[in-house]
Image (cartoon, rainbow, N blue to C red):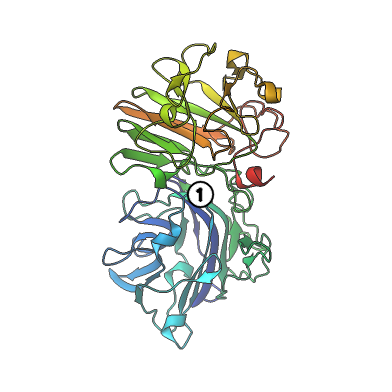
Amino acid sequence: MPNTSITRTQGTPTNAKKWTISYWAKYTGLTTGQWYPTFATDYDNGDSYFGVGSLGAGRNEIGFIEYHTSSTNYGQGGTLAGLRDGHGWYHIVFAYDSTQGTAANRGKTYINGVQATNTYNTDISSNHDSRFNSNGSVLRIGGRSQGSGQYMAGILSHFHFIDGTAYDATPFGEFNATTGEWSIKTEPSVTYGNNGFFILKDGASLTDQSPNTNNFSSSTGTLTPTVDNPSNSFATWNSLQATTSASYTFEAGNTRIAVNDVDMSCCATLAAKTGKYYMEMKWVQQGGNDRWGIQPPNSNVNTHPRANGIGWDQATNQFYMLNSAVSGSWGGSIGTGDVVQLAMDLDNGALYLGVNGTWRNSGSPTSGSSKTGAVDFSGTSLYGELLTWAVGKGNQGTSGWNANFGNGYIEQTAVSSAGTNASGNGIFEYDVPTGYTALSTKGINS
């Protein structure tokens, strides 16, 4: 939700002293010392909000703050260290109950089913009516009206607001008895109250799915739906792998990356040793000696896919594998408006290149062990290793890549006419070769 927010004006609350917010978020591109508000109110000039960022004395936490006439009434949080994973979905619950006799029980945060320890806390006043649930206040999701550029960095799903009850995390999720993973409950049994709502249930719908009709409307930016969800997390560019010396920009849920540096690479967040995977990408900004392809996720990020694995080289318009040129009829240059297709067959050790729906070098991704028209890496050290999508560059100048890892969008624009995909996992512009799927948690475990 980059530079995007949605709003609703609150009505008369069931109980302004008690409320619960539950949502799932895939936080991407977090930077130390900056606020990324997930939701806020425009009451008191937008000074009531909940988010991830710097919360007092240089700490970096997820926390709730409510200001009254420029003075803090309450703030609390867990630690940001537990939310740095740009691939994983987090379940966040905040329960507000100012009627509790013990001050520490008046505000509780749960992260993936576990109550977070307060590292910063100004007690909620006893029986205090919260600004988040007051008649006439504007509830804003995705950012806050005050604070330039203060928007949530990431993706939201299954956003609940409960008016009149302070729930813990258990109505909204549960631990899997086999894996121990915290999993979503898609139909929680809760009482919503007058101002309660349930939005972003399936896609980007702002229509309230609770028994109420407390719908939202777009306020800023464009709300983009995605098939990435708490039950199936798709690969994104890995912001945690970025080198500290380079200038990186990650946007659009980390599907868009721009970088200005010499000799660098950035991998996707998921990798596999077996299986067949497909992705699409636009090379939207040319820098110098830009490269992209596949490589091990633990590669040296101060080099590029041409050296680390298999990389297309902008300067020569051909593939290199571990810095050696790969012969083949690769079809010449690729432009910034072209849709690049990559099909990675890890079972047979083959990588195929397509552009705008045509496989180059007479490639046939379904050819199996014959590896027709592929870069054959079955006899190299890459075969049998973890591999993933990667981009990189060799010269200075800003380069940019926008990927469709299966979300159905490139540059926040939906694919014009989705191709066939027998796996049913992911939405792409062109036909996904039979036997291939998106690099996602379901794709890897299928």
Residue sitting farthest toward the bottom: 101
User: Is residue 391 something that shows in the picture?
Assistant: yes
Q: Return the residue nearer the eye: 440 or 272.
A: 272
Q: Is mark 1 on a helix, strand or loop?
A: loop
Name the side, left or right, on which 193 lies relative to 108. right
* Residue on which disc 1 sits: 87
User: Is residue 400 something that shows in the picture?
Assistant: no
Q: Is residue 313 above or below residue 265?
A: above
Query: Which residue is at a point 46% across and 79% down the rendered structure image?
Result: 106
In the rendering, at what x and y percent does residue 103 appear?
42, 84
Q: Return the residue nearer the eye: 113 or 291.
A: 291
Res 58 → quadrant:
bottom left
Q: Return the residue nearer the eye: 402 or 156.
A: 402
Res 352 → quadrant:
top right
Query: Which residue is at a point 63% across and 17% down the rendered structure image?
Result: 363
Dot 1: few (<14), some (14–19), or many (≥20) neighbours within 10 Å? many
In the rendering, at what x and y percent does residue 366 appear?
70, 24
In the rendering, at what x and y percent does residue 319 appear?
48, 20
Query: Which residue is at a point 59% across and 62% down the rendered structure image?
Result: 197
Instruction: Indicate the quadrant containing the C terminus: top left, top right, bottom left or bottom right.
Output: top right
In the rendering, at what x and y percent does residue 353 appear?
56, 22
Q: How many marks?
A: 1
Q: Is residue 338 above or below residue 348?
A: above
Q: At label 1, which amino acid type do we have?
A: His
Query: Which residue is at a point 63% across and 44% down the rendered structure image?
Result: 444
Q: Return the residue nearer the eye: 168 or 3.
A: 168
